[in-house]
Amino acid sequence: MSSAAPVRVAVVNDYEIVVVGVAAALAPFGDRIRVVEVAAGTRAVSDVDVVLVDTFGQRQRGLQPVTASGGDGARVVVFSWDEDPALVAASVAAGAAGFVSKRASAEELASALERVHAGETVVPADPRPGEPPAADVLGRWPGDRLGLSPREAEVLSLICQGLSNDDITEHAFIGINTVKTHIRTLYRKIGVESRTQAVVWGLQHGFEPDRVRVLES
């Protein structure tokens, strides 16, 4: 899909590394998508067409990213690992014009942003049986260069925000045994043995939410 001018996009999340990483993933599509703002821990303020809200590490699910994203007049797209149909429907009902899975490729994300700008409401399609996710995870996340997977990193970010295992289960839509497995694995990777040690490690390695804004010059 092409347009007369690139779609102007703001990328919003609570972590600078996340918003910068998503912006970098979209950079090869600069003739179609122009990221004019990245905002961590705050609302978008730029005059943009679309606000892309990455849900990594969000304490509240579904409605909060849509209602708190900012970008007056812009259409909101939620970017999330969580594809639960009830959450997708709730996000759209709350005002989101799109909901894109993090299993999408960068090309698919760029296309979704164009379609939303053109007036469509975009939601994840039902996966075809046996269809693998995209080979590369879009963007970056705290702890990626230290060996943590996206899900392990998100679990650690929620631990650092004070969430219990049950809270994480509710937030991330994964079973309690899966949460416990992620915790055991990430503890081993970062060399800690307790929740308190994990929080201390996390706050020393980029898991404290940021507050930063970068506007296109």
Image (cartoon, helix red, strand yellow):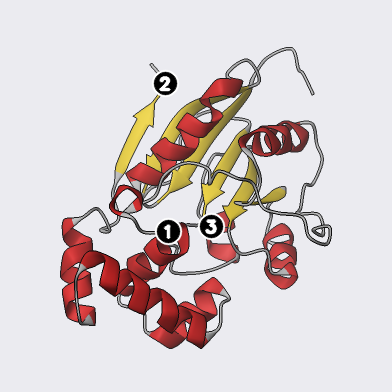
Mark 2 or mark 1, whichever is nearer to me: 1
Q: Residue at x 42, y 83 (%)?
A: 180
Query: In terms of sequence position, does the residue under pointer 1 or pointer 3 come before the other?
Result: 3
- Give yes or no for contact between labels 3 and 2 (Cβ–Cβ under 8 Å): no
Query: In terms of sequence position, does the residue under pointer 3 or pointer 2 come before the other?
Result: 3
Mark 1 or mark 3, whichever is nearer to me: 1
Mark 1, Cα crowd under 10 Å, few <14 / some 14-19 / many 20+, is some
Give the distance between the C-alpha atoms of the residues marked 2 and 1, in whole angstroms: 30 Å
Residue 160, can we see it? no
For residue 65, which numbered disc appears in the image? 3
Pinpoint residue 193: horizontal percent, then vertical percent. Answer: 20, 80
Callout 3: helix, strand or loop? helix
Pinpoint residue 178: horizontal percent, then vertical percent. Answer: 50, 80
For residue 149, which numbered disc appears in the image? 1
Please indicate whether residue 30 sits to the left or right of residue 154 in the image.
Answer: right
Callout 2: helix, strand or loop? loop
Residue that lies at the very extreme toward the top in this rendered image: 4
Q: Residue 202 sits in which quadrant?
A: bottom left
Q: Which residue is mark 2?
A: 216
Callout 1: helix, strand or loop? loop
Residue 137, can we see it? yes
Mark 3, Cα crowd under 10 Å, few <14 / some 14-19 / many 20+, is many
Tell me the quadrant of the picture where the N terminus can be found: top right
Residue type of the residue flagged with mark 3 = Pro
Q: Residue at x 63, y 51 (%)?
A: 103
Q: Residue at x 61, y 36 (%)?
A: 106
Please indicate whether residue 18 sits to the left or right of residue 175 in the image.
Answer: left
